[in-house]
Amino acid sequence: MKKIAIIGGGISGLYFVNLLKNQKDFEYKIFEKKDNYNFLEGYGIQLSVNSIKLLNAIGFQNLPASEVNFPSKVNFIQANNSKKICDIDLTQFNDPLNRYTTLKRSTLLKFLFQNVPKEKIKFNSNITKVENSNGITISFGDNRNEKFDYLIISDGIFSKTRSLIFNENIYPKFNLNVALRGKLTGDFGSDISIYMGSNNHYVIYPVNQNNEYNFVAIIKKKLSSDELKNYDLFKSQKFLTSLVSGLQKTDHTSFENLSELKSFPVYVSNEFPGYNKKNIFLSGDALFTSPPSFAQGASQSIETANDILKCILSGSNDIYEKRIKHINSIKKKSAFNLFSFHLSNPFNVYFRNVALRYLSRNKIFLDNYLGKIYKN
């Protein structure tokens, strides 16, 4: 019986252990630093067709329809006047059983968590050391040691375990943007809308069928090292208000019903970790984090976890290495999206909009730019 340790009980870790239900040759434990899950948090995520297909294989399609939303298109809108530039039809990437989906992150976590025996998750875990010699030995803050055959590291962009493995601190970089997240109530339609402004953009989409919407803005902002370390800054009402007031908006996009606001600096990975071992894998943000402008974080966490299990079962890392190349492609596209969404020069904005109108109807471009991510 092989033993697997999963560090981090987020989407990637929980999905991975759901896959292990039908694998009788493995035992596992999840080690989570938090003391519990928050299933009330209302922030949203987007899941493309690839990841939905994987989730449906473990029963995701049985969720009540009221808890999810199936957008049919992405609208591109000029933020300063709310004029629609164009849209992209998302249904072209769907198949009869799997559709592009938006929902609350907590809804997905709850679905994944319900299939995991309580004794398999160890909350408040404090890992102090990881050794990879004749198996993987994990040491904890209470002077306890446990031994495993495989290690899955999925504890986020600031992964402590990753640093322990590499014997050095691996820090992501601040990419000069701040994210602002919140909930919106009202009627903003059933699709995804991207409002492009000057040095900022914001996205609104429904997370269920109850007129609850996710709001996320990415705002260009320089911050000093001291400000980045000041966690209270990002919670202060003054700072949150300044972020909202800096967004371009019209009567159509009034933020009066915006609630549960949170802000945080946007960090991205510098490079992929070069650790190449057949018994240690990184997943989710611990593997790589791109700018949040391609909405692929959750989907890639799920797809990477699926590939990791294939590698363990086959004894080869080939699939995992292909996944890294795939994520590298997403990194480049995310950075390009962020750049194009934030254009401020009127001349550049004009030509961006002309290009968007053309490319949004060009099937060859869409198949290459989106189809290879959503369906392959």
Image (cartoon, grey):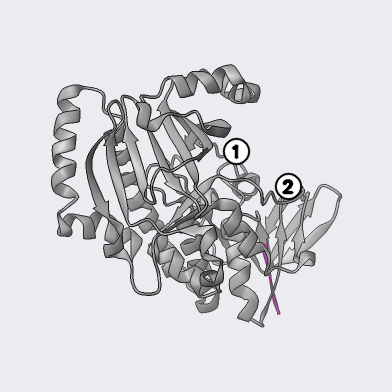
Corner quadrant of residue 225: top right
Q: Is residue 356 visible?
A: yes
Horizontal side of residue 123 vs 84, given as left or right: right
Secondary structure at badge 2 equals loop
Residue at image x 56%, y 40%? Answer: 170
Horizontal side of residue 231 vs 324, given as left or right: right
Query: At which x and y percent is residue 168?
Result: 60, 40
Name the residue carrying label 1.
169
Residue at image x 38%, y 47%? Answer: 189
Which quadrant of the figure contains the N terminus?
bottom right
Could you say which is closer to the camera, residue 102 or residue 231?
A: 102
**What is the span of residues highlighted in magenta in the rendered image?**
1-5
Question: Is 60 inside the magenta-drawn segment?
Answer: no
Secondary structure at badge 1 equals loop
Q: Decide: is 26 above or below 68.
A: below
Amino acid residing under circle 1? Asn
Tell me which label, 2 or 1, sits earlier in the chain: 2
Determine whether label 2 and label 1 are within 8 Å by CB: no
- The disc placed on residue 375 is none
- Mark 2–mark 1 Cα distance, whole angstroms, equals 21 Å
Choose mark 2 or mark 1, whichever is in front.
2
Residue at image x 49%, y 35%? Answer: 267
Q: Decide: is 84 above or below 52.
A: above
Q: Decide: is 341 above or below 45.
A: above
Query: At which x and y percent is residue 335?
Result: 33, 40
Callout 1 environment at 10 Å: few (<14), some (14 to 19), or many (20+)? Answer: some
Q: Decide: is 140 above or below 343.
A: below
Corner quadrant of residue 320: bottom left
Query: At which x and y percent is residue 14?
Result: 62, 62
Which quadrant of the figure contains the C terminus?
bottom left
Name the residue carrying label 2.
34
